[in-house]
Image (cartoon, rainbow, N blue to C red):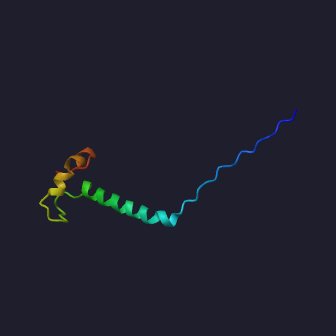
Amino acid sequence: MSQASVATPRPVQPRIPLREIAPWAIFAGVLALLVLFFVSTEAGAVELFGTNGLIHEFVHDGRHLLAFPCH
């Protein structure tokens, strides 16, 4: 009796197209920095939109949760 060996196919690694991912990665990075600015720095002193502290009040609890001082 002879044992027949069965060849198993090797998995093919997909190619990641960096040119297609780069714009989305840059967009996500800028968006993350903008969110970080509003949560950490925007305390009414740098009113970008003239909202009388509305942004500060909106992110106030999140600021304390992330241990950023705001008062």
Q: Residue 50 placed where, x, y %?
A: 14, 65
**Left or right of residue 62, residue 9 in this image:** right
Q: How many marks?
A: 0
What residue is at 18 percent from the left and 55 percent from the top? 56
User: Residue furthest toward the right?
Assistant: 1
Q: Residue 39 placed where, x, y %?
A: 25, 54
The image shows residue 23, relative to residue 13, as above or below, that is below
User: Residue furthest toward the top?
Assistant: 1
Q: Quadrant of the N terminus?
A: top right
What residue is at 29 percent from the left and 57 percent from the top? 35
What residue is at 55 percent from the left and 59 percent from the top? 16
Q: Residue 58 placed where, x, y %?
A: 19, 52
Displayed quadrant of residue 41 = bottom left
Question: 4 or 65, which is in the foreground?
Answer: 4
**Left or right of residue 32, residue 62 in this image:** left
What residue is at 68 percent from the left and 49 percent from the top? 10
Q: Residue 27 placed where, x, y %?
A: 38, 63
User: Residue furthest toward the left?
Assistant: 52
**Left or right of residue 69, residue 51 in this image:** left
Displayed quadrant of residue 55 = bottom left
